[in-house]
Amino acid sequence: MAVEHPVTAPSGDQTRIHNIGYRSYDGPRLGRAYATRSLYSQSLRGAYGLGRSVKSKVLPMLLFVVMCVPAAIMVAVAVATKADELPADYTRYAIIMQAVISLYVASQAPQSVSRDLRFKTVPLYFSRPIETADYVRAKFAALASALFVLTAAPLLVLYIGALLAKLDFADQTKGFAQGLVSVALLSLLFAGLGLVIASVTPRRGFGIAAVIAVLTISYGAVSTLQAIADAQNSTGSIPWIGLFSPVTLIDGVQSAFLGSTSAFPGGIGPSNGEGVVYVLVVLGLIAASYGLLMRRYRRVGL
């Protein structure tokens, strides 16, 4: 049978008050801009595993190397054979390597936002001077910058190699500039779509699967439909089918305005008029992605 013992309060000589030195902060208040820049910097570093565990660095760094190695091989072949041009145009390289780019987006977009949702740290961000728009801009800009580094680095390898091979400076500089414009647009589009998809679920694995499905399945479906249209001599519909995949959207924009050869069946890219529609769709998707992220994080931050 349990016996109850009376609880006695400590005697007066056992009571102590300790001065542990809490003081108010008198330093500078750096404000929203500093907090946004810090979040951008931290997110950009995290996209390549910098400041994180060794395991977190393996996949992004491996994908970066995979992106650059084919460019280095192309340069070596051009130099060794004294070729008059590079094996691949600057604007074509990202389309050739689109599977690697999609895998990078699928792995890093959930890393950027899913953990904040899973561990419910988003309201903590908004308890400081940072606001919803600051958070979304920082995350969007960080992933777009990481993608630009991933896609522009091999173009730089091609450009330096072309100059070493003594190819025409004006032609190579023009092609390099066109390639940078193309990958900048691709980075914004893929970053926006990846973040919107990843922000739907706090589970990183689900986010990775969803991003891969959207980017790769849409490209496979569109390419199949374009091949069917080409086989049935319905060439007029091929450019319009290309509007339904992020990869073919970028392909259409650069083939219409950046002098690239289209990867569409038969090399039938959009005309200038159709290219305007492509540009509007790309810009609309980027703006829509930003708007959806804003709406999503306004709800999360409540």
Image (cartoon, grey):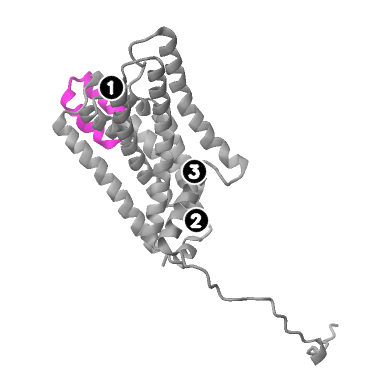
| Residue 210 in sight | yes
Kind of element beneath mark 2: helix
At label 3, which amino acid type do we have?
Ala
Determine contact: label 2, label 3, CB under 8 Å: no
Outermost residue on the left side: it is 273
115 shown above or below 9: above
Q: Quadrant of the C terminus?
A: bottom left
Q: Quadrant of the N terminus?
A: bottom right
Residue 34 picture location, percent across and down: 44, 59
**Range shown magenta:** 223-245
Question: Is label 1 in a helix, a strand or a loop?
Answer: helix
Question: Which residue lies under the disc numbered 3?
Answer: 47
Whichever of labels 2 and 3 marks the residue nearer the N terminus, that label is 3
Residue pictured at 26% horizontal, 26% vertical: 226
Instruction: Please identify the residue farthest to the top as the structure is shown.
Output: 81
Tell us which disc is closer to us: 1 or 2. 1
The spot of residue 277 in percent (x, y) is 18, 38
On whether residue 230 falls in the magenta region, the answer is yes
Q: Which residue is mark 1?
A: 170
Amino acid bearing label 2: Asp
